[in-house]
Image: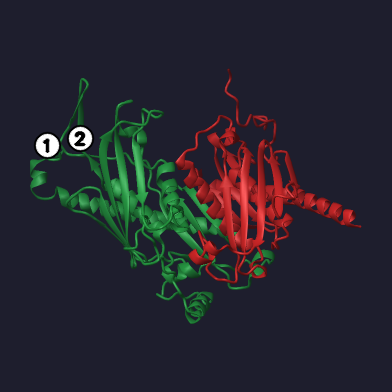
Amino acid sequence: MPRDYDISNNEKQFVLEALKQNLRLDGRKLLQMRDISIVVSPEEYGYVEVTMGKTKVGCRVSGEITKPYDERPFEGIFQISTEISPICSPFFESGQTSNSKQSADEVLISRLIEKAIRRSNALDLESLCIIAGSKCWSIRADLQFLNFDGNFIDISCIAVITALLHFRKPDLEIDGDQLIVFDTNQRDPTPLSILHIPICVTFQFYNPNDNEENIKGDLNNELILIDSNLIEERLSLGSMTLTLNKNKELCQMLKSGGLNIDATLIIKCCSVASKLVDELTTKIQKVLKVDEEQRKSGMESELQVVNDR
Amino acid sequence: MSRFELYSPEGMRIDGRRSNELRSFNCNINTHPNASDGSSFIQQGNSNVICLVKGPMDPSYSTIKNGSGAGQSTSIDEPTLNISINYPPFANNDRRKKLTKNDRRLTELSIILTKCFLKTIVLKNYPRTVIDVQVTLLSFDGGLLSACCNAITLALIDAGIALYDYVTAVTVGIYDQVPLLDLCTLEENDLSFITVGVVGDSDKLNLILCEDKLPLDKLERMIGLGIQGCHRLKELMDAKVREVGFDLLNKKQ
């Protein structure tokens, strides 16, 4: 049985009063994210650990060659697995011991990540096809939730997309009807074809007035928070998750009930999220570039076949 | 065979509507007086949805023992709301096999609707009770979440459960530069669309769902059109509720 997070009335009132005065417990502004650290593995391709404050998530991307689905012979297979285990926090149950229904949080997180990355076609599935109808790449992204301090959705999305960008699949050659897979020592592995970089931003809503004012009234002064930590997430009255990319496209949006928010505030959230997404995309690309340069340094650049021009 | 245009240059959609017209909307409440405490039947175009509400009831022993389920608050001063969506294979145009993949989608939709109505029901009136909502799709032609949301609102009203206000929902798609209101399945398959759920006559959104890629600058117009559509739906639903209410009153006298 999972423990639920008991928040004392004192803590609750303190946090909410502080929010009404635009203060957060860790000193951030309401629309400010925590510092993100993205660490890509220097030895292997496709493993990334992302830390946001105390929340930590690891993502590993792996690929193998299988037969494509019958109804989609020209596309590869891409799966994302998001199983939350009690390792990150005692509030989550392990998949085997709970009844067949996954908890609401887990279902929402996995559906959100799936919609953000799979449905928006961040990974081009047609590029994974090797021989139509018989051989294709099956790419699998496994998310490991290592520590929970609020805001799993944003951090998981960053982890998956960075791992996908970092992953390299072994080089292939088709010789008649034989498929030759080269080892990483023989030929440099090739990156995946990522069409765009979707990044999720989750907003939490709080009501400084009472319920009736929110539903019937006109004040429209609900408080909006970005990147909540554990206590802020538990106290929030509603949340909205937006997934945007650098091309100013909205990949998915979900506001599932909770506090009623005026449409103008929602548009404002979109523009705030858009700026954040631009910054995060630049950060991810920088991290990957640094990693690539580090790998190339030393002996490898001497032995490279490609000449400098 | 010519490919039909989703939106002709003259402004006609494939079913002859304009860009800002709703599909024909029919609703009825108290359709199953013996099977449930509250029931409703909604027809939005060709989508037919039945909703049955049982409650407020005493919680069963298993609910008390296991605590609250998905997305519920654990406070004993609030009711437990269980929404289940039933999407039978004959509801679609071509009979679909029961895939487990869709189960996750339906679970997600029921969690979304639960959260939505937990904010709309006057919770303090129903402490320590269970409200069971069952939605069945008889025929699906676009607007899954919106039809379910409208049906649940009406059924809750019919069951006598106190709501702060109506929650009406509608889909809005975008075709090039033109936002289209209330999409049917053919349009949903080809266009990016959002579903908007609005509370009463206000401009406040309770629910917003977008699953496809959408250019950000079009969002504002789509939400605006969606809000207008929802207000119109609320008028239609309110008229029906008052009509049934007057009938009941007259029968009693």
Relative to B247, is B210 on the left or the right? Answer: left
**Local secondary structure at mark 2:** loop
* Quarter of the C terminus of chain B within the rendering: bottom right
Asked whether A3 or A184 is in front, the reply is A3
In the displayed image of the protein, which residue is found farthest to the front?
B61
User: In the figure, the red chain has which letter?
Assistant: B
* Amino acid type at image mark 1: Gln
Relative to A123, is A289 on the left or the right? Answer: left
Residue A216 at x, y percent in the picture: 69, 65
Q: Colour of chain A?
A: green
Residue that appears at 32% across and 33% down: A127
Q: Chain of mark 1?
A: A
**Local secondary structure at mark 1:** loop
Give the colour scheme shown. by chain
Residue B13 versus residue B129 in the image, above or below? above
**Dot 2 surroundings within 10 Å: few (below 14), some, or many (20 or more)?**
some
Q: Which mark is residue A186?
A: 1
Residue A126 at x, y percent in the picture: 35, 32
Residue that appears at 88% across and 53% down: B251
Residue B135 at x, y percent in the picture: 62, 47
Nearer-N-terminus badge (2/1): 2
Residue A283 versus residue A89 in the image, above or below? above
Residue that carries the numbered disc 2 in the rendered image: A171
- Please say if the residues under marks 2 and 1 sit with CB atoms less than 8 Å apart: yes
